[in-house]
Image (cartoon, rainbow, N blue to C red):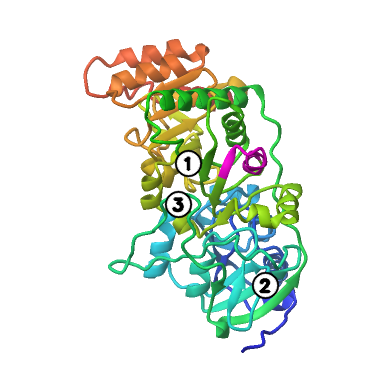
């Protein structure tokens, strides 16, 4: 059995060289790296002060703690980033074209990494609750992409975080897929099925340092739902009740996937608060506070995800009653939580948010006015394309009502009309299933657009008299142009 070197965060950061690729653990702030990258950012600043270059390429499962993206971006120490982020300073550098950012589906990253198409990983850096001499590792509040990162990396640095209890075994379900032609089926038939190991195992010879820490996860509590978010949630709840009454929910209510943010929290609250909706499960990529509230209210039966993106008080609530929650929660690698095969088999109801939706049903999730990145596509495409019911929710307007979120044409398209089944705003629900382009357009305008913009949208639709889709180049981006001129 191997003894591992015990290092400080500064000593670990000294190992990383200019141009290295680091793959950081966590999924959102859950289980994210907290001290090594902070020291690395300080080291980069010192190197820059000497007039020398220093940047690293950064891979992650999803977004990260501020000690990763914020710290490294502020230190101008990131040259390349994938697949998703929520950091303001990093976003600014991406939009200034000072960081090369690859926005990609979360389920697509693992095959590319395993094939070598994304290059080699020099260091996998992640958090653990326990590390054993044989290379067995107990992860903390997330799994994300850590199993693949750890297996592929040349070297491993582990933040051993005492904030997380070392009796978490049973929370994680570690299962990796081979590349074709050795890929096997993923034998998950219910969200509660556990198919892998409770501990992650790595080659102990690759572990070059253990860094003791005691730093909490920095998950943020969601703010109370505003009136618009609440109404959107109620509209989605009614949509699903109608689908259930129409007999399109199978023998029981299908599992729910919901994206991250206040709108998602509001709609989940509306779902589990509705007496017309039976107890249900979650098969999602993330668990937020509202999911735990639903479990405690005995309205959410089980939740499968890649990470616990919950506020510190809620995480402590879980940790203080672990035996009960271990029966209600499991954390999986994102290649399983977002796997198309499983999403389709389970009949998942995918609910995600949009920046804008056009009248044809195309959705922009990522780029403001088509140019400036917000966060990234994340897992929304994984679920939209493969869910039994796919829903996009958005307030009908943005920027205080100065621009419509329902537009003639999206300025950037992440999800095409072919994958979008429902659009929901505070004004209503547009069911796009079985409708041709002109029917979709009228339905979206009538059911979802803000009343102040419906006349303009209908006028645009009537401008082009022929064609399968009534595209009129003049006016296609009239809302965007008007907003840009007013800024």
Per the rendered image, the range of residues in magenta is 290-301
Percent x, y for residue 459? Answer: 37, 11
Q: Does any portion of residue 58 appear in the rendered image?
A: yes
Label 1: element kind: loop
Q: Earlier in the sequence, mark 3 or mark 1?
A: 1
How many numbered callouts? 3
Residue 130 tag number:
2
Above or below, 207 relative to 427: below
* Image quadrant assignment for residue 50: bottom right
Residue 338 tag number:
3
Q: Alpha-carbon distance for marks 2 and 1?
A: 32 Å
Label 2: element kind: strand
Label 3: element kind: loop
Q: Alpha-carbon distance for marks 2 and 3?
A: 26 Å
Q: Which residue is mark 1?
A: 255
Drawn side of residue 82 relative to residue 76, left or right: left
Q: Residue at x 55, y 45 (%)?
A: 375
The one nearer the camera, 394 or 74, is 394
Cβ atoms under marks 2 and 1 closer than 8 Å:
no
Percent x, y for residue 238? Answer: 50, 23
* Quarter that holds the N terminus: bottom right
Percent x, y for residue 47? Answer: 69, 72
């Amino acid at each position: 059995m191997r003894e591992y070197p015990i290092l400080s965060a500064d000593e670990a950061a000294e190992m990383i060289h200019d141009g290295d690729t680091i793959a950081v653990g966590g999924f959102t702030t859950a289980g994210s790296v907290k001290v090594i990258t902070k020291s690395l950012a300080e080291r980069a600043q010192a190197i820059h002060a000497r007039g020398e270059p220093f940047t690293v390429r950064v891979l992650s499962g999803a977004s990260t703690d501020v000690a990763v993206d914020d710290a490294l971006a502020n230190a101008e120490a990131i040259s390349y980033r994938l697949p998703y982020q929520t950091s303001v300073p990093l976003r600014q550098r991406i939009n200034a074209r000072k960081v090369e950012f690859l926005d990609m589906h979360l389920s697509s990253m693992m095959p590319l990494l395993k094939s070598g198409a994304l290059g080699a990983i020099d260091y996998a850096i992640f958090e653990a609750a326990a590390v054993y001499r044989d290379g067995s590792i107990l992860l903390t509040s997330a799994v994300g992409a850590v199993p693949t990162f750890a297996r592929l990396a040349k070297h491993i640095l582990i933040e051993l975080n005492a904030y997380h209890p070392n009796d978490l075994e049973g929370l994680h379900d570690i299962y990796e897929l081979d590349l074709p032609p050795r890929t096997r089926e993923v034998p998950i038939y219910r969200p509660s099925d556990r198919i892998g190991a409770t501990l992650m195992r790595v080659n102990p010879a690759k572990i070059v340092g253990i860094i003791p820490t005691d730093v909490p996860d920095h998950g943020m509590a969601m703010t109370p739902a505003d009136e618009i978010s609440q109404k959107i949630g109620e509209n989605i709840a009614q949509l699903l009740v109608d689908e259930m009454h129409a007999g399109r929910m199978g023998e029981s209510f299908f599992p729910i996937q919901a994206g991250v943010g206040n709108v998602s929290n509001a709609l989940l609250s509306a779902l589990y608060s509705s007496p017309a909706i039976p107890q249900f499960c979650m098969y999602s990529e993330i668990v937020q506070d509202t999911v735990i509230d639903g479990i405690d209210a005995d309205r959410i039966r089980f939740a499968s995800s890649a990470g616990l993106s919950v506020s510190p008080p809620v995480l402590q609530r879980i940790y203080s009653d672990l035996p009960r929650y271990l029966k209600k929660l499991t954390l999986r690698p994102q290649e399983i939580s977002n796997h198309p095969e499983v999403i389709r088999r389970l009949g998942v109801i995918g609910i995600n948010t949009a920046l804008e939706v056009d009248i044809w049903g195309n959705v922009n999730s990522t780029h403001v006015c088509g140019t400036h990145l917000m966060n990234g596509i994340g897992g929304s495409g994984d679920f939209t394309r493969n869910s039994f019911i796919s829903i996009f929710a958005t307030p009908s307007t943005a920027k205080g009502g100065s621009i419509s979120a329902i537009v003639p044409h999206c300025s950037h398209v992440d999800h095409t009309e072919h994958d979008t089944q429902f659009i929901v705003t505070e004004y209503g629900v547009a069911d796009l299933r079985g409708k041709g382009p002109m029917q979709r357009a009228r339905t979206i305008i009538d059911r979802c657009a803000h009343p102040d913009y419906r006349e303009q949208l209908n006028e645009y639709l009537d401008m082009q008299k022929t064609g399968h889709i009534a595209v009129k180049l003049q006016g296609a981006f009239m809302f965007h142009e008007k907003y840009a001129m007013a800024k």
